[in-house]
Amino acid sequence: MDLGAITKYSALHAKPSGLVLQYGTAGFRTKAEHLDHVMFRMGLLAALRSKQTKSTVGVMVTASHNPEEDNGVKLVDPLGEMLAPSWEEHATCLANAEEQDMQRVLIDISEKEAVNLQQDAFVVVGRDTRPSSEKLSQSVMDGVTVLGGQFHDYGLLTTPQLHYMVYCRNTGGRYGKATLEGYYQKLSKAFVELIKQASCSGDEYRSLKVDCANGIGALKLREMEHYFSQGLSVQLFNDGSKGKLNHLCGADFVKSHQKPPQGMEIKSNERCCSFDGDADRIVYYYHDADGHFHLIDGDKIATLISSFLKELLMEIGENLNIGVVQTAYANGSSTRYLEEVMKVPVYCTKTGVKHLHHKAQEFDIGVYFEANGHGTALFSTAVEMKIKQSEQLEEKKRKAAKMLENIIDLFNQAAGDAISDMLVIEAILALKGLTVQQWDALYTDLPNRQLKVQVADRRVISTTNAERQAVTPPGLQEAINDLVKKYKLSRAFVRPSGTEDVVRVYAEADSQESADHLAHEVSLAVFQLAGGIGERPQPVSCLY
Ligand code: 16G
Ligand code: MG
């Protein structure tokens, strides 16, 4: 490690004094103008991680669904997964070190993690379409270089595409080719083969409207569409040619406001979907004949996918298990439907993709989705073995095995991916002959409400049982329990946000009015018992 060079270059990416950031569930995220030093240092850290794992590591420059002025950075571990927890701590230490402490922190990390500094390092870098992203990704590469590492700059990529590249590079090409062409071909080939098996792929299955949040998803989907156009035609909206990134559009807007994005013309019963700003989240929706908006969120996506996969499993195999992983935000109706109607075991983890991903790896087929549309399905080697053995099976079983093989190719195994999930969903709808309304009708969501409460220090709230119960401050959980009892089919929980300085409140109940009241009452309890600041929480009717 050439400490002299590190100090010299670090001064060119100086840290604004006093700024403290935390590597959270989505990496570092804040106003773009505060991030130059963080990017340089994450370049250094990625090089160290690459040396330690003797593998390619990824760095993605994006702030997903945040406003255009923000930016962020996330490291991708060798198998395409989120950064290991001990390295998240190193990331926080390194990002917050004052200039004169940088050398010591770097040496500390290298020693703690037994990094062989002589080892080569290789880092791949991707970025979204924000105006600040190009320069910030350059700072990442500066960091990698100063530590003696090599890099490949993929330029503009969706976040899941970067995960895919990392995964391909560390599996000797077995998973796929680490190029955009490789990604497009792998997914499109699997999709087109699946669609061919649909007996009822009439016109209504052939077109889909996609809101791209004025982000990177638009560019990449446009590059990709001709690869799969024989199976599906996509009409792109909010493609970045006019509007602002994530402004009144995108998956986060549609899910949290429960209304369609601006800039998209929707006729009744047309199937539509929205990506978020870095294309790792997707939600579907439509307008019914009466003009009512229907949201089909991550929970209903998980239901569609897991029921289809369960059918395929029943066709081909004994002794293979399937599980669905959700978070506390999953609508109660979805959990009930999965467990009671579909007889699929459901597990709940903390919020954040890495927790769901980890749990899903325990099953032969693990389907995981957050209600907000982050998710994918993972497959064990036992499933792949079963498919290989299917040559000897009877015709019907062989067909199911072939479908499963294509589905595995179509799912991005490295991360939840809006493009890949979209193609999986489109294929399943066509294969099952389901309209968007029929899909939506699988179950009815319980009315729910999410609110935010400002408190002096959100760390006073700690939770257990996958965030469904508050442990501290004292008395808060008892207060929530008492409030919940007042309503039918009700449930509520609170948790400190991992991405914003707020406490989040979730409530659901048998009617929208009840869910709104409950959410408001729980917000007041948080305000009183957890050190609320600013204005007291307003009733929901005053907010919307
Ligand atoms: C991050 C997480 C997402 C989670 C969200 C919760 C990843 C890649 N992203 O965006 O999964 O739903 O944070 O945000 O893990 P919150 O803690 O502010 O509610
Ligand atoms: Mg995202």
Image (cartoon, rainbow, N blue to C red):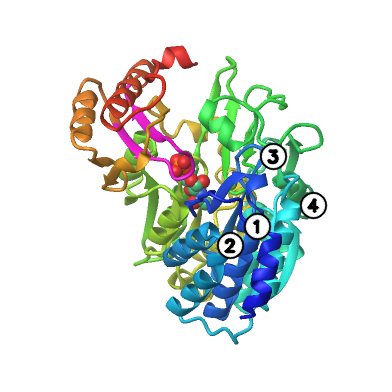
Q: Report the side of 321 relative to 290 (left or right).
A: left
Label 1 crowd bin: few (<14), some (14–19), many (20+), radius 10 Å: some
Callouts 4 and 1 close, C-beta under 8 Å: no
Amino acid type, label 4: Glu
Image quadrant in which you'd find residue 528? top left
Q: Disc 3 designates what residue?
A: 212
Task: State how far apart marks 2 and 3 are (Cα).
Answer: 40 Å
Q: Secondary structure at mark 4?
A: helix
Q: Secondary structure at mark 1?
A: loop
Q: Name the residue at 38% across, 59% down.
A: 359
Amino acid type, label 3: Cys
Closer to the camera: disc 3 or disc 1? 1
Give the mark nearest the N terminus, 4 or 3.
Answer: 3
Q: Disc 1 designates what residue?
A: 14
Label 4 crowd bin: few (<14), some (14–19), many (20+), radius 10 Å: few
Give the mark nearest the N terminus, 4 or 2.
Answer: 2
Callouts 4 and 2 close, C-beta under 8 Å: no
Which label belongs to residue 99?
2
Label 2 crowd bin: few (<14), some (14–19), many (20+), radius 10 Å: some
